[in-house]
Amino acid sequence: MTLLREIQTGATDSGVDISTLLRKAKILAARLRNPEFEYWVDHELNGYDDTKNLPSYRVVPIVAKAQLTDGFRTWNNFQILTSFLPEEFEAWGKECRLNQPIAMIADLATKDNLAIAWPQALAVKYGAQGTNDYECLRAWQEVNPSRLVGILDIVRNRLLDFALRIERENPEAGEAGPNVIPVPPERLQPIVHNIFNAPVGNIAQNSENIQQTASIGVSPEDLSRLVRELTKHIGELNLGERQLHRAQNQLQVIQTELEGETDSTVLIQAGKTIRNITEGAIASLIASGVQPTVWHWIHQTLGAAFGGS
């Protein structure tokens, strides 16, 4: 069985350890000599150092909970009123950024809800906001294990897509010798870009035969779908009138850019504005289970395309 077929088989069999599958992908990455693919495989295996530059699928919605007391009674599992959080701490109330090695995520996915503690100073100051006469003893982010299973599935799906696409280009690509380029760079780079669209930056500065751009991380087709889906479902977010109007205007800007000669600066700015307006409401909808498939895809695509600072 070729290396590509081994990866395909492992990706479709949940009984195959995800780390073992990624190690086979690491061999493939070395033979293809593509630094972006290598970057992705290495960081899935070993973890990401920078939580600000994670793939969008590793940023998951959470429920913020706390243990409160009024000196006589204890209130366990109080759902924190995150509207009281100042802007710089909002993320603690709506999302968790998982940078651990994939093996650790796989292990956590087999357990009960994952609890990630808030900094104690943050918990004491904001955990009991909106209640009367209570103080916060501790607070945490609660992550549903299904979100972790979702990360594993996404990694398997991306490896499967990649192995299938590479096989179409060259069925023997995984068996290439050390001095052979099994897939021409001009054919390989678009495949890598479309499948592994995490914000890895320009990591190939000193590499040869690499075409790269610092741009958005999704295809025009996905951007068009994003505009359609958000336009169709934006009423579910219950935005204020002004915010709704702003978001709709920016969606129109993106649509206009996609229909003509695209100005990436204008497009990216419009996308980031939409993300800033909607991400809190989207995270709440995902957590509540409203249209989870649609909103999870929108959340991932916004993060992949416009997740930079």
Image (tube, rainbow, N blue to C red):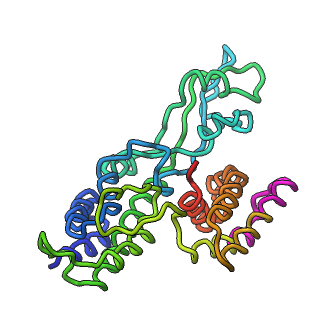
Residue 188 placement (x, y as % from top left): 34, 75
- Which residue lies at the image location 52% right of the left edge and 44% below the top edge? 96
Tell me residue 155's x, y (percent).
38, 63
Say which quadrant the N terminus sits in.
Answer: bottom left
Residue plotted at (51% across, 56% down): 56
Visible residue check, residue 223: yes
Q: Is residue 168 above or below residue 79?
A: below
Q: Residue furthest right?
A: 241
Instruction: Give the left or right position of residue 126, taking residue 206 as reference.
Output: right
Residue 145 position (above or below residue 140): below
Q: Is residue 146 visible?
A: no
Please say whether residue 244 is one of the residues in the magenta stretch: yes
Residue at x-position 34% and y-position 54%: 44
Residues rendered magenta in the picture: 229-247
Residue sitting nearer the eye, 100 or 223: 223
Where residue 132 appears, as percent x and y from the top left, is 78, 23
Q: Please tell me which residue lies in front, 8 or 290.
A: 8
